[in-house]
């Protein structure tokens, strides 16, 4: 064997053209994860990456102004993934829970209707290798840290904001992609070609609808009204000034609350329904926002104060109506050049509290497989089969488990009668065991 065997071999996708559709969590994380795992010897042949994103670079409070949990437990390891990507410290600095390992930064809690804790979870045990084992962070803050890192990594102009992908045509060895700028001045569609297309366009993926029309989202019987309430600095009411979680005991109604920052907290009021309802999100008209606010105040009557105070303080620009929808993951064909990651593959409702974690892990694991995958034969064609198989084996079981877990969370949050009491006893036993 020659000494060359000790040095990394050229990755299969060296010098290839890669298009990513969607600059959400998975689409941002994938090129960052690929660069982190790419052998330095072949840095000159790092793939040419172009990203197309429907939205603009700036965030809108109604789309990104809420907070999410990044976890480091056996259900999701977003924390470990951000650590491997070299982004965890920066994220923690802008997170709600901060850099401290102490428990004083707030806990995931389940409350009864009197806001008495039924269960409080501080997150997994501290780990000497990690500065934190879980975090609660504004979604726009997480997005901004990744955008800054990506802009520092890719050549200028690699991210095409306000550009929607409208069509994908897989060819035998290439993928043809049609994109269009969203503004009226320059609205003509452009066709481009790439060797690999990474689809990261989220739960309602238009590309999935086009290439896999039968693979639809399922309604999970829950409709949500949501918003972010604003208060003077430091006056967010307790307990949602520090803690986040659900209020149980109102039967078919559920309430989730969380701090967003020192001046805001989010609320998510959910109710059981036979049919999904029309989705509404920012920007809403004044009348729509007002109507929703009144509906939320009315529906939230079973929940004690500070629920009404919280809802009354809602910023109308953040009000939304959405349905709990999900779909199980799917595996890729061995000869596919179109790869679906994150919610575009395995959409999960917010009740999973894990979709962002799965998106980060998908990005890392796909980048791992593609950066270590070598040509399998002397053939010049791009054989992604083994890398895709290895990737699917990592992504599918965990996302399926997270989706199943979200069904359990829905059942707990909207339980009534004897089922509610059974959960109450279950949580009391856990409290006893945990001391
Ligand atoms: C209220 C709420 C609370 C949540 N809480 C949590 C939580 O606590 N923990 C957690 O882990 N997860 C949580 N999630 C889920 C998490 O936000 C998603 O699972 C995650 O964002 C999925 O990442 P993604 O990159 O696959 O998709 P997204 O982040 O949705 O990104 C998709 C991107 O694609 C763009 N796009 C769409 N179509 C096109 C197109 N045709 N052309 C170009 N661009 C396009 C979109 O504009 C978007 O930027 C929550 C979600 C919601 C709504």
Image: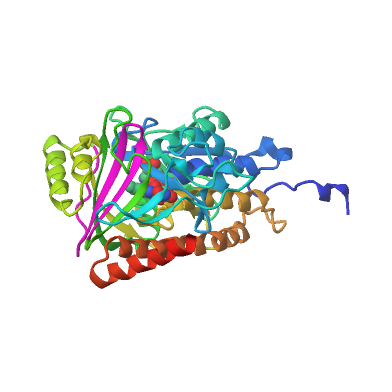
- The reply to whether the magenta stretch includes residue 72 is no
| Residue furthest bottom as drawn | 418
Q: Nearer the viewer, residue 231 or 205?
A: 231
Do we see residue 215 in this rendering?
A: no
Would you identify the image quadrant in which residue 219 lies?
bottom left
User: How is the model colour-coded?
Assistant: rainbow
Percent coordinates x, y for residue 143 in the rendering: 44, 37
What is the tally of numbered marks visible in this picture?
A: 0
Q: Is residue 351 left or right of residue 33?
A: left
The residue stretch that appears in magenta = 253-282
> With respect to residue 190, does 354 lie above or below?
below
Q: Is residue 230 left or right of residue 212?
A: left
Q: Is residue 152 left or right of residue 430?
A: right
Q: Nearer the viewer, residue 333 or 238?
A: 238
Q: Residue at x 45, y 39 (%)?
A: 97
Percent coordinates x, y for residue 422 in the rendering: 32, 71
> With respect to residue 234, does 126 lie above or below?
below
Q: Nearer the viewer, residue 193 or 148?
A: 148
Percent coordinates x, y for residue 51 in the rendering: 47, 38
Q: Residue at x 58, y 41 (%)?
A: 131
Percent coordinates x, y for residue 230 in the rendering: 26, 33
Do we see residue 110 in this rendering?
A: yes
- The reply to whether the magenta stretch includes residue 277 is yes
> With respect to residue 426, does 307 lie above or below?
above
Name the image quarter holding the N terminus.
bottom right
Main secondary structure found in the magenta portion: strand
């Amino acid at each position: 064997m020659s000494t060359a065997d000790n040095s990394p071999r050229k990755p299969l996708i060296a010098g290839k053209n890669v298009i990513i559709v969607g600059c959400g969590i998975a689409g941002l994380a994938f090129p960052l994860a690929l660069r982190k795992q790419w052998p330095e010897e072949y840095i000159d042949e790092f793939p040419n990456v172009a990203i197309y994103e429907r939205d603009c670079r700036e965030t809108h409070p109604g789309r990104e102004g809420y907070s999410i949990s990044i976890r480091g437990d056996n259900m999701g390891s977003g924390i470990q993934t951000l650590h491997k990507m070299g982004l965890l410290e920066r994220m923690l600095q802008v997170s709600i829970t901060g850099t401290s390992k102490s428990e004083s930064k707030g806990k995931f809690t389940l409350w009864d209707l009197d806001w008495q804790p039924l269960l409080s979870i501080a997150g997994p045990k501290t780990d000497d290798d990690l500065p934190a084992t879980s975090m609660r962070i504004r979604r726009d803050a997480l997005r901004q840290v990744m955008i800054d890192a990506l802009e520092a990594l890719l050549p200028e102009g690699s991210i095409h904001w306000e550009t929607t992908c409208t069509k994908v045509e897989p060819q035998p060895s290439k993928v043809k992609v049609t994109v269009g700028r969203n503004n009226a001045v320059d609205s003509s569609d452009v066709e481009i070609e790439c060797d690999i297309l990474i689809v990261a366009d989220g739960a309602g993926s238009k590309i999935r609808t086009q290439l896999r029309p039968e693979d639809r989202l399922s309604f999970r019987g829950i409709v949500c009204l949501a918003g972010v309430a604003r208060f003077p600095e430091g006056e967010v009411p307790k307990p949602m000034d520090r803690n986040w979680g659900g209020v149980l005991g109102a039967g078919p109604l559920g309430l989730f609350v969380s701090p967003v920052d020192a001046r805001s907290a989010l609320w998510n009021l959910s109710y059981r329904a036979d049919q999904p309802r029309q989705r509404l999100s920012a920007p809403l008209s004044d009348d729509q926002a007002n109507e929703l606010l009144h509906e939320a105040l009315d529906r939230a009557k079973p929940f004690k104060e500070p629920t009404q105070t919280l809802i009354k303080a809602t910023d109308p620009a953040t009000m939304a109506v959405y349905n709990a929808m999900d779909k199980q993951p799917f595996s890729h064909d061995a000869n596919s050049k179109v790869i679906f990651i994150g919610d575009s593959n395995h959409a999960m409702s917010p009740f999973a509290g894990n979709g962002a974690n799965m998106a980060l892990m998908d990005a890392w694991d796909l980048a791992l497989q593609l950066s270590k995958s070598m040509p399998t034969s002397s053939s010049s064609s791009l054989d992604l089969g083994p890398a895709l198989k290895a990737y699917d084996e990592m992504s599918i079981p965990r996302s399926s488990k997270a989706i199943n877990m979200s069904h359990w969370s829905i059942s707990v949050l909207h339980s009534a009668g004897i089922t509610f009491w059974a959960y109450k006893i279950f949580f009391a036993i856990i409290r006893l065991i945990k001391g």
